C-alpha cells in the first residue's frame, strides 16, 4: 500500500491510497469485486471502474453489473473475456482511492489437498450459475491410471463416507468422512455435458493413533449467568437474532431462487439454542457461530427464556427433545432444559408408528393445529430428535373491507393469476421508499405489539427481487425498522393478496451451510450425554403464514418504485414479508411470495 501527502500553497491536502489483489477464478463461476466497504456512502463521491485501461462505468461488458451504487462489481458468469486488471477509482473532495484486482481465468479448479487419515475433506466443485440446476455433477476417481465412477448420492453401507453436500445446487462439493489411505488419488468433477470443473489430488497422511475420546474433561452443566440484570444481554440477543435471521434467509434464497419461501428464525434459533445447552468444545463454538452469539455469552439461555416470556402475548414458543431410551441424558441437561426452555426431554417409543404419531400430535398441539403433520415416519435407528414450535396470531389494527374482491397477481415470469384480495380504499399505514434496499416498504400494525413489513421491489422481475434480497443485511433491516418508526402513517389505498404459505425447506442442507455438519457425524454433546454417543439424525422445519381479513396467522416448526406521496400501496407482484415483534425488537417470520 502506498500513502502520499502533498501540501500546496492553498493548504490543500491530497491522499492517494492503492491496493491490489490477484485472483484465480474458474470459468463459468460468479465473482464479486469490492471497491470499498458497503458502509461507504457519500453523495459527493464519484466512482469509476476501469478494465484493462478502459473506463467501463457507463457501458460495462456482458455479464458485468454494478452493485451497492458501484461499490462492488459482480461478474456472472466469468468467462476468459473477463480476464485482466480491474481498477476502482473513488474521488471525493481531494481524496482519491484506488483498488485494483488482477483476474486470471482458468478452465477448472486444480488443487492438491493433504489430509490426515481419519479426518474429513471437502472436494470442491461448482457448476456455472443458472436459475435452476437440473442435474448434479459427475465425480470420478483415478488411481494408478484406473478411473472409477463415484456416486455420492448413493446411500448404501459401502458408500456412507461419501456425501454430496448440496444436491441440485451450484455448489457440488462432496465430503469424504473418516478418510483412509485408499482414498488417496486424483478426483475429477465434470458437468453433465462432460466439461471439467475441478481436479483435486488427495494425499493421505497417517498419524499416530489417538487415545479414545472421553467426556471427563468437559463440564456437565452450562455455566451460570453471572449478571442476570445486565443491560447488554437483551440487546446482544436482539442483534444476534437479526443477524441470524438474515443469514438464514440468505442461504435459503440461494437454494430456492424463485419460489415461495417462509421460515421462522425464532423457531430455528430456539431449537439450536436448546441444543447448545449440551454442546461442548468445537460443537459449542460451531452452534454459537451459527446463531451469531459470542462465545463468552453465558447468559444466552437466560435471555432466551426472557425473550420467550416477553413474546408470550403474541407468539407461543415451545421446545422439545426426543431421544433414544438406550441413551442416558445427563441430569444437568434435563434440569436446565426444563429451567430455560420448559421442556423435559422425552424418550422415544418402541415403534416408528408410535413415534410418528407422538411427534405429529405434539406439533399440532403447539401450533394450535396450524401444522398437523411434520414427519412421515421415524427411523428405528433415530437417536435424537430436536423440535421447536412457534404459533403467532395477530389482528390487523385497521380492518380491511370485508366485501370479497379479486385481482390479478403478476408472477416473476409475467403470467397473471387471479387472487382474492385484501382491500381498503383509505387504510392507515406507514409507507416509504427505502433507498438502501431499493424497495417500497409498508408497515402494517398488528395486535400484540407486532408489525408486518412488506418490501415491494421495483418490478416483478427476478433481478429486482434478488437485488432487494442481496441488500437485506441485518444492518440494513434494522435501519429500515428505525426509519419506518419515524415514518408517519397516512391514509392510502391498500391492496394485498390473501395468501396462505406452507413451506418446509430442507433443513439438513441448511444446517450444513451453517457450518453444523458435525452434528450429524461426531458432535461433542458431552453436556447432554456423558458417553457422547448421540448424533443428530434429522432436522425438520415447517412454517405456515396466512394473510386474511382478520389478520396474520402464522406457525412454524423447526419450520416499480413509488414516491412517498403516492397515495396507494399495491402488492400484486412478488414481494418479501417480515413479521417483526416491536415489543421484543426481533424478527419472528421472514419469507417471500412469488406465487400466491
Image (tube, helix red, strand yellow):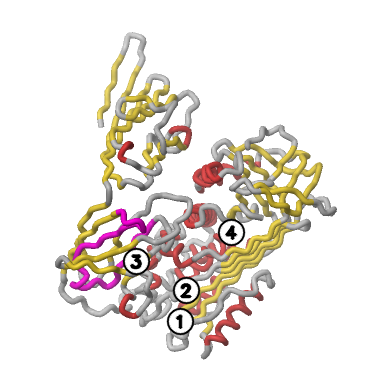
Q: What residue is disc 4 on? A: 262
Closer to viewer: mark 4 or mark 3: 4
What span is colored magenta in the figure?
171-195
Kindly indicate whether the residue at mark 2 contacts the one at mark 4 (C-beta within 8 angstroms).
no
Q: What residue is disc 3 on? A: 282
Q: Residues within 10 Å of mark 4 (few under 14, many from 20)?
A: many
Residue 482 in sight here? no
User: Disc 4 or 3, which lies upstream in sequence?
Assistant: 4
Q: Quadrant of residue 596?
A: bottom right
Q: CA distance from mark 4 to mark 3?
A: 30 Å
Q: What residue is disc 2 on? A: 538
Closer to viewer: mark 3 or mark 2: 2
Kindly indicate whether the residue at mark 1 contacts the one at mark 4 (C-beta within 8 angstroms).
no
Q: What residue is disc 1 on? A: 382
Q: Secondary structure at mark 2?
A: loop
Q: Could you tell whether 409 is left or right of 174 in the image? A: right
Amino acid at each position: 500500500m502506498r500513502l502520499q501527502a502533498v501540501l500546496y500553497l492553498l493548504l490543500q491536502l491530497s491522499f492517494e491510497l492503492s491496493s491490489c489483489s490477484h485472483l484465480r477464478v474458474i470459468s463459468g463461476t460468479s465473482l464479486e469485486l469490492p471497491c470499498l466497504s458497503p458502509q461507504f456512502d457519500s453523495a459527493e463521491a464519484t466512482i469509476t471502474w476501469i478494465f484493462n485501461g478502459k473506463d467501463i462505468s457507463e457501458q460495462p461488458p456482458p455479464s458485468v453489473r454494478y452493485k451497492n451504487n458501484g461499490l462492488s462489481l459482480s461478474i456472472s458468469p466469468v468467462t476468459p473475456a473477463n480476464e485482466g486488471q480491474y481498477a476502482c477509482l473513488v474521488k471525493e473532495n481531494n481524496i482519491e482511492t484506488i483498488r485494483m484486482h488482477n483476474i486470471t481465468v482458468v478452465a477448472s479448479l486444480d488443487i492438491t489437498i493433504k489430509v490426515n487419515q481419519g479426518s474429513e475433506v471437502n472436494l470442491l466443485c461448482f457448476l456455472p450459475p443458472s436459475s435452476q440446476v437440473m442435474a448434479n455433477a459427475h465425480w470420478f476417481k483415478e488411481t494408478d491410471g484406473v478411473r472409477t465412477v463415484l456416486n455420492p448420492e448413493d446411500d448404501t453401507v459401502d458408500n456412507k463416507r461419501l456425501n454430496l453436500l448440496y444436491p441440485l445446487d451450484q455448489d457440488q462439493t462432496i465430503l469424504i468422512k473418516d478418510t483412509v489411505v485408499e482414498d488417496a488419488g486424483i478426483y475429477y468433477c465434470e458437468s453433465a455435458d462432460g466439461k471439467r470443473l475441478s481436479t483435486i489430488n488427495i494425499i493421505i497422511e497417517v498419524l499416530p493413533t489417538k487415545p479414545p475420546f472421553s467426556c471427563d474433561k468437559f463440564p456437565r452443566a452450562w455455566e451460570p449467568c453471572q449478571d442476570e440484570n445486565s443491560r447488554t444481554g437483551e440487546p446482544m440477543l436482539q442483534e444476534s437474532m437479526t443477524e441470524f435471521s438474515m443469514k438464514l434467509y440468505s442461504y435459503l434464497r440461494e437454494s430456492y431462487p424463485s419460489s415461495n419461501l417462509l421460515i421462522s428464525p425464532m423457531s430455528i434459533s430456539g431449537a439450536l439454542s436448546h441444543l447448545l445447552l449440551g454442546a461442548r468444545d468445537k460443537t459449542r463454538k460451531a452452534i454459537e457461530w451459527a446463531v451469531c452469539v459470542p462465545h463468552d455469552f453465558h447468559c444466552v439461555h437466560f435471555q432466551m427464556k426472557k425473550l420467550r416470556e416477553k413474546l408470550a402475548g403474541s407468539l407461543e414458543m415451545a421446545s422439545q427433545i426426543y431421544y433414544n431410551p438406550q441413551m442416558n441424558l445427563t441430569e444437568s441437561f434435563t434440569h436446565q432444559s426444563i429451567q430455560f426452555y420448559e421442556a423435559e426431554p422425552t424418550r422415544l417409543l418402541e415403534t416408528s408408528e408410535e413415534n410418528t404419531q407422538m411427534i405429529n400430535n405434539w406439533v399440532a398441539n403447539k401450533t394450535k393445529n396450524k401444522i398437523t403433520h411434520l414427519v412421515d415416519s421415524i427411523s428405528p435407528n433415530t437417536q435424537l430428535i430436536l423440535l421447536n414450535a412457534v404459533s403467532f396470531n395477530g389482528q390487523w389494527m385497521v380492518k380491511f373491507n370485508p366485501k370479497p374482491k379479486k385481482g390479478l397477481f403478476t408472477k416473476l415470469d409475467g403470467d397473471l393469476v387471479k387472487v382474492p384480495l385484501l382491500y381498503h380504499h383509505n387504510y392507515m399505514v406507514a409507507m416509504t421508499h427505502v433507498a438502501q434496499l431499493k424497495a417500497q416498504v409498508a408497515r402494517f400494525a398488528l395486535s400484540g405489539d407486532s408489525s408486518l413489513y412488506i418490501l415491494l421491489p421495483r418490478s416483478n422481475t427476478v433481478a429486482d427481487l434478488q437485488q432487494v434480497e442481496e441488500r437485506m443485511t441485518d444492518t440494513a433491516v434494522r435501519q429500515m425498522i428505525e426509519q419506518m418508526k419515524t415514518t408517519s402513517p397516512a391514509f392510502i389505498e391498500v391492496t394485498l393478496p390473501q395468501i396462505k404459505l406452507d413451506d418446509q425447506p430442507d433443513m439438513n442442507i441448511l444446517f450444513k451451510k451453517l457450518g453444523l455438519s458435525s452434528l450429524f457425524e461426531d458432535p461433542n454433546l458431552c453436556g447432554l450425554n456423558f458417553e457422547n454417543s448421540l448424533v443428530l439424525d434429522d432436522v425438520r422445519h415447517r412454517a405456515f403464514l396466512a394473510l386474511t381479513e382478520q389478520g396474520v396467522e402464522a406457525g412454524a416448526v423447526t419450520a416499480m418504485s413509488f414516491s412517498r406521496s403516492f397515495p396507494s400501496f399495491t402488492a400484486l407482484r412478488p414481494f418479501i414479508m417480515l413479521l417483526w415483534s416491536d415489543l421484543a425488537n426481533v424478527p419472528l417470520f421472514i419469507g417471500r411470495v412469488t406465487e400466491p
